[in-house]
Image (spheres, rainbow, N blue to C red):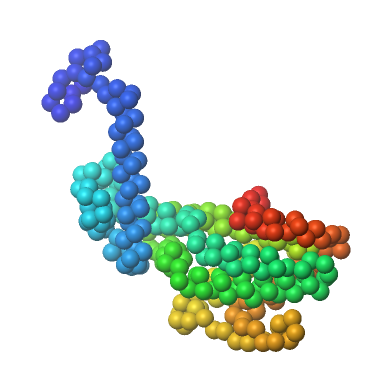
Amino acid sequence: MTLAGEEVVKGDESARPSKNENEKKRQRREDLHDLLLHAAREVVQQEGIETAPRNLTFKQVFEHVESMTGRHVTNASVIGRIWENQADFQADVLVAIARDQERPEVDLTLQAVSAVLNEVDLTSVESRLYALQELCRVGGAASSSAIARSPIWSLWISVLTIATTTSDLEQRKRIGAALADGYETMTESWQGIYVWLLDFLGFQMREPMTTHQFTVAVTALNEGYSLREHVDGGIEQFFLPTGRNGEDQEWTLFGAGLEALVHRFLEPDPRFTPPSQGTIGGTIEVIDDTEPVR
């Protein structure tokens, strides 16, 4: 066997890379892979994604890495070692964005509704219905505002557009599978939160509807409304006399639509027993750590 003009005598193990050396090389490749994917996502967050995407090139990402870390990366470092070519790299970046579970709008929405839940009155059906209404109003506004400012959500929509318009069938398949995974993960996360809220507020699903169907309906409404916001360039708000004493309150279209879905899917649970007042405050803290429903 000959390596770069160097003859290796059969049975001479000294010329072969050790297991530790191979492991170190593999680790270096993985580190470079992760570094370049992170850098590529920063580039597209700053510049957006063209539909090809023609602006996501090795050259741009290498320059970004060097400006941020001082590390010089070349085509020879990655082509044939990490990615087959630039198109393979671009697809990997788009897949990473599609699978991204970092959605800051979720945290901002949960922070807003936690404030409502800390003040909730669970002693009657009427007070629980009012709490549900407030969750729709406040949570809808918080979600709309957070998504309108979210660069991650905008990137995700760009990836969705590429996945449905690209002529590269293999790339479409890879990105489509990643988008499906991302959808499933996000649906499971929100479904776990909704199950917790139903239990806390004393509501149940109207038969034969399911929490999964409710979650998909709310998510689809939110995404569609958010697309409209991006096109219109603003969040439409209006006032309704929905306060405790009939005073006007500010609503968003998404919040109003969410309330309509809530009344179609949910009903008071006749078996519900309100918790003692002293346990409510501590209970609210678990909303951010709710486990997904499998």
Q: x and y percent of residue 251 in the render?
A: 62, 81
Q: In the displayed structure, would residue 71 be above or below residue 176?
A: above
Q: In this view, does 231 lie to the left or right of 15?
A: right
Q: x and y percent of residue 147 in the render?
A: 50, 70
- Quadrant of the snapshot with the N terminus: top left
Q: x and y percent of residue 282 in the render?
A: 69, 55
Residue at x-position 31% and y-position 39%: 29
Q: Using the rendered view, name the quadrant where residue 285 is placed.
A: bottom right
Q: Using the rendered view, name the quadrant where residue 94 is placed.
A: bottom left
Q: In the displayed structure, would residue 69 be above or below residue 1?
A: below
Q: Outermost residue toward the top?
A: 11
Residue at x-position 65% and y-position 54%: 286
Residue at x-position 32% and y-position 25%: 20
Q: In this view, does 15 lie to the left or right of 52?
A: left
Identify which residue, 85 or 191, lies in the foreground: 191
**Residue 40 at least partly seen:** yes
Residue at x-position 71% and y-position 75%: 133
**Residue 211 at least partly seen:** no
Q: x and y percent of residue 263 in the render?
A: 74, 73
Q: Outermost residue toward the right?
A: 270
Q: Is residue 219 left or right of residue 22?
A: right
User: How many numbered discs, if any?
Assistant: 0
Q: Outermost residue toward the left?
A: 5
Identify which residue, 203 or 243, lies in the foreground: 243
Q: Using the rendered view, name the quadrant where residue 53 is placed.
A: bottom left
